[in-house]
């Protein structure tokens, strides 16, 4: 496209040429996020403030164009992809931390603020922003709110929804609303709770008031090395059953270690079947007591070794191995398909066995690195998209793994969202009536049909061709059996 | 939405052996971890000017999905090549190499405007490879400064109105000093005994003119530590600027001449090839890759590259003597991109600074974010460069440091310009410095105190 469409011309008139991307070759770089799906936007608009967002939404409505909000595009369920074309509203230029209130332990931020930048700023006041997704170096608070992002340290502190107090929201008809309150609990319905995790389908967040937490005075990170995944899983269950809530409890398997170790030299032994990263934090005395108890439990399951790191550099080194794991998989195969499922913790050993079995059956290497403490699995299927049929095999295997999680009494997402990727699996856990109820809630926010269309809910108008045909086949095989 | 199409088996857009490697392009899984590390993404706020985006454009060209339009070329041109994305990348995508390869293709395929090509040849072929011409230019600059002409030009601001580019160059010009003459000077400083090792100093094209004292300090510091330093006369510009710009043939020519000058086949190899300019250092370490297809030089280039050491790196390697002279000063250290991101040398310069009694190191929030110098970027992309510098200076000034220390002449020039422009209350020393100069100063102060 080398002549701007009327939509593009209106957008340029509203926010200027510098803030609108519309040439074909440039649009190429907005067709992906952090996963394997693609979407083709017609135009990208980059607002500088809330007024811009209002104008952009009104212009999109005038042209009946779909609107897709996007932060840093690091998401893992296709949430920021323009599944039905239209306008991507990129929030990355609104990246100011407006205020940090150390007394009330809150921060007021624009949605394009990067998670880690907020964390660093909070640190200057002795505070922390708890949710720490692995992409925290790049992902934005706006995206975190949309997807209700988690991270290793949300085991003790809770996911994003537990850390958002109030939001400025521009609704689908272009109205600006403040919802929530700067105190913990507001009388009436928890509207903030509805918006967090709504995956950009009810409006665009333009400011967020978030909670900060005190930084722990002491931290101890333990690395436990096991010769079988089952031993490691049993250790996880035992730690949680003990009543201790570690700050983080992560498992990393052999395939992941093989990817991470050569690049990051974290010291994970290459021949171990699984390692656990367990972190306890708090006041010195508590860390000492809990650390000793956790170590005792870990030792009951015949680890090869339990190592402890207390100095920040050593700890960061261990965490680098976890947080850099996904990207490092590129060392083994050029593409990966990262799944996100949740199962009851007691089911972990059996479900993991099932995951390895499915991967083997589909002849796909699988790497597991995940938040074991809350039963949030992240099997990562490795493949090369240039190999004919590989992508289809991966999607089929992914569907089976999701089904496995559901059959074990779990769910199809722990923190990445449903997005485009897993919308066809939604009937596995919800009835028609449930989904209708959710749609009514969405409609209560205004005319939202064009707002991030094709996400969360199966099919939908104009999205039929966009869904995974393979996911549909899975549905045909297993049936949309609903259990709640 | 569809799954990414596999590349068609059509004719390739690339013409040379320097093309970006398809396998290396494939390493990028577009996770986006690089975005927040990229100064141009942060400044321009568009993914077309992010590392992930530029790789997508390279792939788009490779797959034949897009045309190599001037707009696409602009996104490549706007890259600082600071390689901060490589530090952030969990897949270890060799972005710097991919960008150099793409620029090599752009250069070979004449993707630049005519005027830019002519200027490039004039300066990069006619001036930089010739130390004598560079010195002449230096004397010209000295004349311009000593006669008060520069002061007049800057006061009137006339140049900015007539020729803004020239005004940018003027603001970045060094204070011309007595240039460093390769071996004439190096050999005058006799090595301390016993000699532990022999090293050859790469003098480079800019350093002898802009910061000759850094070279003198380098020779003195290593001499004191028992390293005999020579600076072979026949050496030339290392070719880093040429390679970064995509002019790989010129870069190869310069590399061959340096290999002949520093490691002639007739004599013993130096134990180390020393460099105090980060941009040159990272390029010198790439000589092996640069000349990999040259039968006569491939092996020698690898041997050469393996011996290249940044001065900080080598000081820590040999275990430098603790300095004793006190320097009561607060400094902040700017990681030169090609030292931190390209060579992964981060702690050594800080170790050197912390060894100096009395000196306080006050860190910036983002010490390893580019200052916007980036070789000739500060001149050819001066608007972005100035904004990147403005943000850097805010960080520098917030540290309360009296002096900024860095590891590359380009960064020193840029930061000097930054201090002149942004340090309104004159809290900072007007000239930036190199850690080796501070170490030299401390050694000499210690000697003076010892002699009293």
Image (cartoon, coloured by chain):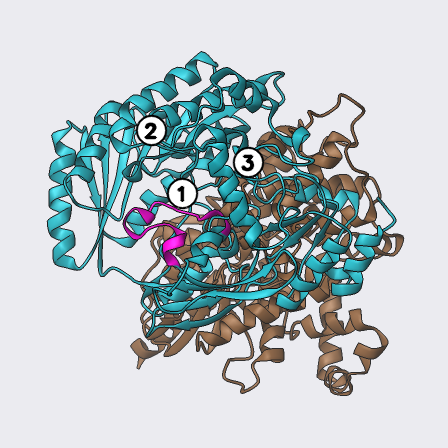
- Residue B52 sits in quarter: top right
Chain letter for the residue marked with disc 2 in the picture? A
**Gap in angstroms between the C-alphas marked 1 and 2:** 28 Å
The single residue placed furthest to the front in the displayed view is: A433
Residue B256 visible to the viewer: no
Specify start and end residues of the magenta stretch as a single range: A146-163
Q: Say if the magenta span includes residue A158.
A: yes
Q: Residue at x 76, y 39 (%)?
A: B105
At which x and y percent is residue A11? 77, 58
Q: Residues within 10 Å of mark 3 (few under 14, many from 20)?
A: many
The residue singled out by tag 1 in the image is A323
Res. A35 mark: 3
Q: Residues within 10 Å of mark 2 (few under 14, many from 20)?
A: some
Q: In this structure image, what is the colour of chain A?
A: cyan
- Chain painted brown: B
Circle nearer the N terminus (1, 2)? 1
At which x and y percent is residue A274? 29, 28
- Residue B123 sits in quarter: bottom right
The residue singled out by tag 2 in the image is A409
Q: Say if the magenta span includes residue B288.
A: no
At which x and y percent is residue B125? 79, 52
Q: Residue at x 38, y 68 (%)?
A: A106
At which x and y percent is residue A483? 39, 28
Circle nearer the N terminus (3, 1)? 3
Disc 3 is placed on an element classified as: loop
Chain letter for the residue marked with disc 3 in the picture? A
């Amino acid at each position: 496209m080398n002549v701007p469409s009327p939509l593009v011309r209106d957008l340029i008139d509203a926010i200027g040429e510098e803030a609108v991307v519309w040439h074909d070759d440039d649009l190429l770089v907005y067709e992906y996020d952090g996963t394997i799906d693609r979407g083709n936007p017609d135009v990208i608009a980059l607002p500088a403030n809330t007024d811009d967002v209002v104008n952009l939404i009104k212009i999109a409505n005038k042209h009946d164009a779909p609107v897709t909000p996007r932060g840093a595009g690091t998401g893992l369920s296709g949430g920021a992809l323009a599944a039905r074309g239209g306008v991507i509203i990129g929030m990355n230029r609104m990246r100011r931390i407006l205020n940090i209130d150390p007394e009330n332990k809150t921060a007021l931020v624009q949605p394009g603020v990067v998670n880690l930048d907020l964390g660093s700023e909070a640190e200057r006041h002795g505070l922390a922003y708890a949710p720490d997704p692995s992409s925290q170096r790049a992902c934005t608070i706006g995206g975190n709110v949309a997807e209700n992002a988690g991270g290793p340290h949300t085991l003790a502190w809770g996911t994003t929804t537990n850390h958002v107090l109030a939001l400025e929201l521009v609704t689908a008809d272009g109205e600006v609303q403040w919802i929530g309150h700067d105190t913990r609990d507001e009388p009436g319905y928890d509207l903030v709770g509805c918006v967090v995790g709504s995956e950009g389908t009810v409006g665009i967040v333009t400011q967020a008031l978030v909670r900060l937490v005190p930084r722990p005075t002491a931290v101890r990170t333990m690395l436990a090395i096991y010769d079988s995944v089952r031993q490691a899983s049993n250790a996880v269950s035992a730690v949680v059953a003990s009543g201790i809530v570690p700050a983080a409890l992560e498992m990393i398997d052999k395939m992941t270690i093989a990817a991470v170790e050569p690049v990051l030299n974290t010291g994970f032994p290459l021949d171990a079947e699984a390692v656990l990263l367990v972190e306890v934090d708090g006041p010195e005395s508590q860390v000492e007591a809990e650390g000793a108890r956790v170590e005792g439990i870990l030792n009951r399951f015949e680890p090869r070794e339990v190592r402890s790191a207390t100095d920040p550099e050593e700890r960061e080194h261990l965490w680098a191995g976890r947080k850099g794991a996904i990207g490092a998989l590129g060392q083994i195969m050029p593409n990966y398909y990262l799944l996100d499922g949740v199962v009851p913790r007691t089911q972990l050993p059996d479900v993991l066995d099932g995951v390895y079995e499915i991967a083997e059956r589909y002849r796909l290497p699988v790497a597991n690195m995940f938040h074991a403490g809350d039963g949030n699995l992240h099997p990562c299927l490795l493949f090369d998209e240039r190999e004919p049929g590989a992508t289809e095999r991966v999607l089929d295997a992914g569907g089976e793994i999701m089904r496995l999680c559901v059959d074990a009494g779990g769910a199809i997402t722990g923190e990445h969202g449903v997005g485009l990727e897993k919308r066809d699996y939604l009937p596995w856990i919800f009835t028609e009536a449930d989904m209708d109820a959710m749609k009514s809630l969405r409609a209560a926010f205004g005319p939202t049909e064009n707002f991030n269309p094709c996400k969360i809910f199966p099919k939908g108008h104009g999205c039929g061709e966009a869904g995974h045909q393979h996911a549909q086949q899975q549905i045909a095989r297993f049936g949309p059996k609903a259990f709640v | 939405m569809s799954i990414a199409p596999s590349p068609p088996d059509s004719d390739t857009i690339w013409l040379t052996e320097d093309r970006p490697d398809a396998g290396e392009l494939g390493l990028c899984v577009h996770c986006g971890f690089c975005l927040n590390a990229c100064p141009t993404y942060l400044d321009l706020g568009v993914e077309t000017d992010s590392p992930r985006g530029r790789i997508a454009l390279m792939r788009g060209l490779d797959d034949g999905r897009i045309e190599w339009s001037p707009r696409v070329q602009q996104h490549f041109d706007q890259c600082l090549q600071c390689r901060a994305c490589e530090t952030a990348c969990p897949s270890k995508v060799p972005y710097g190499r991919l960008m150099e390869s793409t620029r090599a293709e752009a250069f070979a395929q004449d993707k630049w405007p005519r005027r830019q090509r002519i200027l490039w040849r004039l300066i990069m072929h006619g001036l930089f490879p010739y130390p004598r011409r560079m010195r002449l230019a230096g004397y010209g600059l000295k004349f311009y400064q000593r006669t008060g002409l520069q002061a007049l030009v800057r006061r009137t601001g006339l140049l900015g109105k007539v020729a803004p580019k020239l005004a940018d160059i003027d603001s970045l010009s060094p204070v011309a000093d007595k240039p460093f003459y390769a071996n004439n000077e190096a050999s005058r400083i006799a090595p301390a005994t016993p000699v532990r090792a022999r090293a050859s100093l790469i003098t480079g094209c800019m350093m002898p003119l802009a910061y000759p004292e850094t070279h003198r300090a380098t020779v003195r510091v290593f001499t004191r530590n028992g390293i005999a330093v020579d600076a072979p006369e026949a050496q030339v510009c290392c070719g880093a600027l040429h390679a970064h710009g995509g002019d790989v043939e010129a870069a190869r020519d310069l590399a061959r001449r340096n290999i002949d000058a520093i490691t002639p086949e007739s004599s013993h190899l130096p134990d180390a090839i020393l460099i105090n300019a980060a941009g040159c250092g990272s390029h010198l370490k790439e000589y092996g890759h640069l000349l990999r297809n040259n039968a006569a030089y491939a092996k020698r280039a690898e041997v050469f590259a393996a011996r290249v050491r940044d001065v900080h790196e080598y000081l820590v390697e040999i275990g430098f003597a603790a300095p004793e002279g006190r320097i009561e000063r607060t400094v902040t250290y700017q990681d030169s991109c090609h030292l931190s991101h390209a060579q992964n040398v981060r702690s050594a310069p800080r170790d050197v600074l912390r060894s100096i009694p009395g000196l306080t190191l006050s860190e910036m929030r983002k010490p390893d974010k580019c200052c916007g110098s980036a070789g000739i970027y500060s001149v050819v992309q001066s608007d972005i460069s100035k904004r990147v510098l403005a943000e850097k200076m805010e960080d520098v000034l917030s540290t309360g440091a009296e002096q900024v220390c860095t590891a590359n002449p380009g960064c020193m020039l840029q930061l000097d310009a930054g201090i002149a422009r942004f340090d309104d209350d004159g809290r900072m020393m007007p000239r930036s410095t190199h850690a080796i100069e501070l170490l030299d100063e401390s050694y000499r102060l210690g000697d003076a105190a010892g002699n009293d």
